[in-house]
Amino acid sequence: MGRSNTIVTIPQKLTKGKELVVLTREEYEKILNHNEKVAEVLKIIAEGEEAYREKRTIAASSLEEALKIYERI
């Protein structure tokens, strides 16, 4: 599939003088999905930091040791 050199002029009224970026739906959905994952990770990090500040964390030298402390293995 070849690329077309079609030029489209977007009125400044529509963009309110700001820059405009055009993405395919696929690219847009990938970005949305990525942002959702980032938000989830940031929430987990914030919860961990809060637990650390409230001294609700443990000290373990390995994941295996931590799981033993929590009696999960």
Image (spheres, helix red, strand yellow):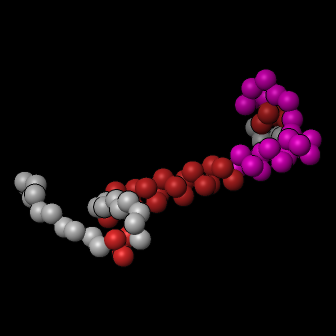
The region drawn magenta spans 44-65
Residue 49 percent coordinates (x, y): 80, 44
In which image quadrant can residue 9 be found?
A: bottom left
**Looking at the picture, does residue 62 appear above or below residue 4?**
above
Report the residue that reaches farthest toward the bottom.
13
Which of the two residues, 47 or 15, is positioned nearer the viewer here? 15
Which of the two residues, 31 or 63, is positioned nearer the viewer here? 31
**Looking at the picture, does residue 60 appear above or below residue 8?**
above
Report the residue that reaches farthest toward the left.
2
Residue at the image position 54 percent from the left and 58 percent from the top: 36
Disc count in the image?
0
Q: Is residue 58 magenta?
A: yes
Residue 31 percent coordinates (x, y): 43, 55
Q: Is residue 18 left or right of residue 67?
A: left
Q: Is residue 41 magenta?
A: no
Residue at the image position 40 percent from the left and 66 percent from the top: 17
Q: Is residue 47 left or right of residue 16?
A: right
**Looking at the picture, does residue 4 appear above or below residue 60?**
below
Residue at the image position 89 percent from the left and 43 percent from the top: 53
Report the residue that reaches farthest toward the top.
61
Q: Is residue 19 left or right of residue 1?
A: right
> The C terminus appears in which quarter of the rendering?
top right
Residue at the image position 35 percent from the left and 62 percent from the top: 20
Residue 19 percent coordinates (x, y): 38, 60
